[in-house]
Image (spheres, rainbow, N blue to C red):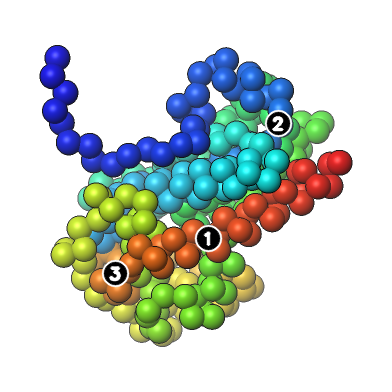
Amino acid sequence: MARNAENLYVVKAPKTLYEMTSAEVGAALENTKTVLIPVGATEDHGAHLPLGTDMFEAREICRRAGAALDAVGCPVVIGPTIPFGVSTFHMGFPGTITLTSNTLILVLKEVMMSLYQHGFRNMCLIHGHDGNLPQMMVAAQDVVNETPDATVVVMNWMVELAKAYAAGLGKSRKGESHGGEGETARIIATHPELVDIAKARTFYLQPHELRKIQSPEHMKSGGGLFYPTRSYKALTPVGSIGDPSLATEETGEQGYDVIVNWLVGIIKRDFFDEAT
């Protein structure tokens, strides 16, 4: 059969659990007990980005972190990307798929318990969608409660990335957020074929609106306040916040560097340096 279909995007090495054979996982377990689990979502990100943006980001973050850890003698396995999350507040946009909080908690627990049964003991939950953070924390605590020796860490890289943007990363000096300059830049850096920047629309929230979505006060950015979101469509009819046209591949690569450097430092310290 002829194969002449155009590639939509390319999946780069290293392999994740999805691309590995069972034998390869068994061999990896002889060298490591640490697994990175990308937790994504399927939801609207404006007319210019794919619904799988959060899934692609989560996988890419773990892929890059896994390669960087291997380069410093800290081997890990990149686990299965969870493609769905809690996206109830994006359901006003067609194509969005949401799980309830209880379902996501159960999915994460059962994935981790399966990995635990095979021999993994150190599990890093790494999000691509910050709306999953509360459920990730509950699942992490439950797995620790229910096993004698599992260690689970929930890693919210948004705090470090927010610091980088506050220090001048990127072009925008306004309120970029969901599907804006930063997120668009990271997808341009990894999946440019899936970005249609000509369809991007600029839309900024008022300061009092943005404060409850993404600000230094919000827990996901390192603050002490959490505001549940009712409807993104009520906030942004275009599905994104900011000016995606400002995004560049360079900014996307810089954003990934910030995220990965932080993750690698924590994982190396917690699961390799302190274990020797």
Q: Secondary structure at mark 1?
A: helix
Mark 2–mark 1 CB contact (< 8 Å): no
Query: Which one is in front in this view, the residue at disc 3 or the one at disc 2?
Result: 2
Q: Secondary structure at mark 2?
A: loop
Assess disc 3: are there few (<14), some (14-19) or many (≥20) residues with their C-alpha within 10 Å of its C-alpha. Answer: many
| First reached walking from the N terminus: tag 2 or tag 1 | 2
Q: Give the amino acid type for the residue marked by disc 3 in the picture.
A: Pro
Q: Is residue 268 visible?
A: yes
Assess disc 2: are there few (<14), some (14-19) or many (≥20) residues with their C-alpha within 10 Å of its C-alpha. Answer: some
Query: Which one is in front in this view, the residue at disc 1 or the one at disc 3?
Result: 1
Q: Is residue 28 left or right of residue 78?
A: right
Q: Where in the figure is residue 177, as x and y percent of width and height?
A: 40, 70
Residue at figure coordinates x 14%, y 28% from the top left: 4
Residue at figure coordinates x 51%, y 43% from the top left: 63
Which disc is residue 32 wearing?
2
Residue at numbered disc 3: 244
Which disc is residue 147 wearing?
none
Q: How many marks?
A: 3
Q: Nearer the viewer, residue 94 or 123?
A: 123
Residue at numbered disc 1: 257
Q: Is residue 36 left or right of residue 213?
A: right
Q: What whole-number distance in Å separates the C-alpha atoms at marks 3 and 2? A: 40 Å
Q: What whole-number distance in Å separates the C-alpha atoms at marks 2 and 1? A: 24 Å
| First reached walking from the N terminus: tag 1 or tag 3 | 3
> Is residue 91 positioned above or below 211 on the image?
above
Assess disc 1: are there few (<14), some (14-19) or many (≥20) residues with their C-alpha within 10 Å of its C-alpha. Answer: some
Q: What whole-number distance in Å separates the C-alpha atoms at marks 1 and 3? A: 20 Å
Q: Where in the figure is residue 153, as x and y percent of width and height?
A: 68, 48
